[in-house]
Amino acid sequence: MLKAYYNALTKIKSPMKNLAQHLETIVQEKTTAIKAIQSCQDVENVRIAFCGRKGHIAHLMEQLKDLPIDEKKIYGPRINQLKTDIQQELDALLHTISQEEIAKKNAQQKNFDVTAYRLKELKGTTHIYTQIIEDLENVFISMGYDIIDGPEAENEYNNFEALNIPAHHPAREEEDSFYLKMPGMLLRTQTSSVQARAMKGKTPPIAFFSPGRVYRKEATDQTHDFLFTQAEGLLINKDVSVSNLLATARTFLQKIFEKDDLNIRVRPGYFPFVEPGLEIDASCPFCTQGCSVCKRTGWIELLGSGLIHPNVLKEGGIDPTIYSGFAFGMGIERIAMIKYGINDIRLFHSSKINFLDQF
Ligand code: FA5
């Protein structure tokens, strides 16, 4: 408001009747303008309106130069005095107002609630993979198993030959695996590839659990991915039998699904590295009479397993006439999908925060 008023005032160019009258008007205007000042910006506006290059004082000075010398001697000092008075008053006001403005700002800051504008916090959690793998590892550690790692870039020997999968076997077809440019190397297709590595140079008992990523050239859908996570479990000792395998499977599945009455059943299955080969199903952890998770069968397929084939023991440097063992493998995502009701495997490495922060 004040600025607009003084902008208008400075534009008055019509000459006054005489300088005395004009001077009188400017003195009154000055009093009114200074009274209306409320902020530092107002002080600046009034200073420009009165003392600026095109302000009232400059206008009075312009009129002065046309007066006779004796009148110049009277009005010249008066105009200068008016200018000095305005400047002193404005300086004093500026000092007071700026102190008040600082005090006001400080008071506002004192009551500033630092939490009022806090951005929504993104809390990190361990990835669902990490959680389920740690849960599994803890169960196997409690049963005396070692946790071991194997390389994802693996040689054909460990991924196939040592597992009784010879060169002509269909599982070795180029279109099923990601072969690397380095001859004889591929991205491992199963965590069973750690078996030979874990046996060589060791004397039983050997017991390990080994989770890790595997790769298969597969089209992806809700339950299949080209990159997924498996875990391998293996135990070798004297007189290891299918009942040891089944007791171990039942125990760890009960622990993982937190269900003491979870049961298992066995069907024949084929894997070249076990004999006999067994598919192990768990009774549905969510129902007794059939639900959508178990597709109304009451059972869920969970493990490929069996007694380790004598050829595999021999490749690992272990005498199959003295020792026997079992091995089993599982899809980690499959277990997590069942446990947490996840309906699409691709969510696991989607990096979608709204999926991940549920766990
Ligand atoms: C194997 O990979 C064997 N190595 C398992 C095994 C170990 C048998 C030791 C005997 C002794 P299979 O190809 O069925 O088996 O895979 C095991 C699990 O991996 C499956 O049950 C499934 O849960 C998971 N799986 C297989 N293919 C995919 C895929 N494309 N995407 C996601 N999960 C998969």
Image (cartoon, grey):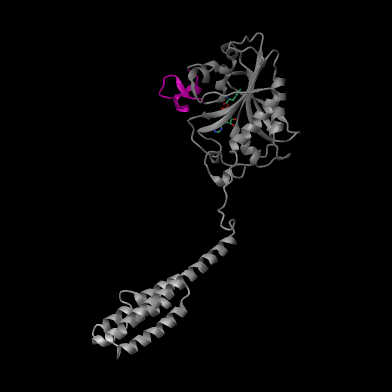
Q: Quadrant of residue 304?
A: top right
> Residue at coordinates 52% horizontally, 35% vertically from top-left?
225
Front residue of 273 and 102: 102
Task: Please state the horizontal and vertical placement of residue 248, each as a whole percent of the image.
Answer: 70, 24
> Residue at coordinates 69% horizontally, 12% vertically from top-left?
238
Front residue of 203 and 261: 203
Task: Please state the horizontal and vertical placement of residue 273, each as a whole percent of the image.
Answer: 58, 18
What is the span of residues highlighted in magenta in the rendered image?
Answer: 168-188
Task: Please state the horizontal and vertical placement of residue 232, each as a whole percent of the image.
Answer: 60, 25
**Is residue 51 a member of the stretch shown in magenta?**
no
Q: Quadrant of residue 199?
A: top right
Residue 7 appears anywhere in the view: no
Residue 281 appears anywhere in the view: yes
Task: Please state the horizontal and vertical placement of residue 29, each as a whole percent of the image.
Answer: 40, 83
Q: Quadrant of the C terminus?
A: top right
37 above or below 239? below
> Residue at coordinates 54% horizontally, 25% vertically from top-left?
190
* 51 left or right, relative to 206: left
Q: Quadrant of the N terminus?
A: bottom left
Q: Quadrant of ligand 1?
A: top right
**Is residue 172 a member of the stretch shown in magenta?**
yes
273 above or below 178? above
* 170 left or right, relative to 254: left
Given the current orientation, which residue lies at the most extreme right position? 261
Q: Looking at the image, how many numbered discs can be counted on the residues?
A: 0
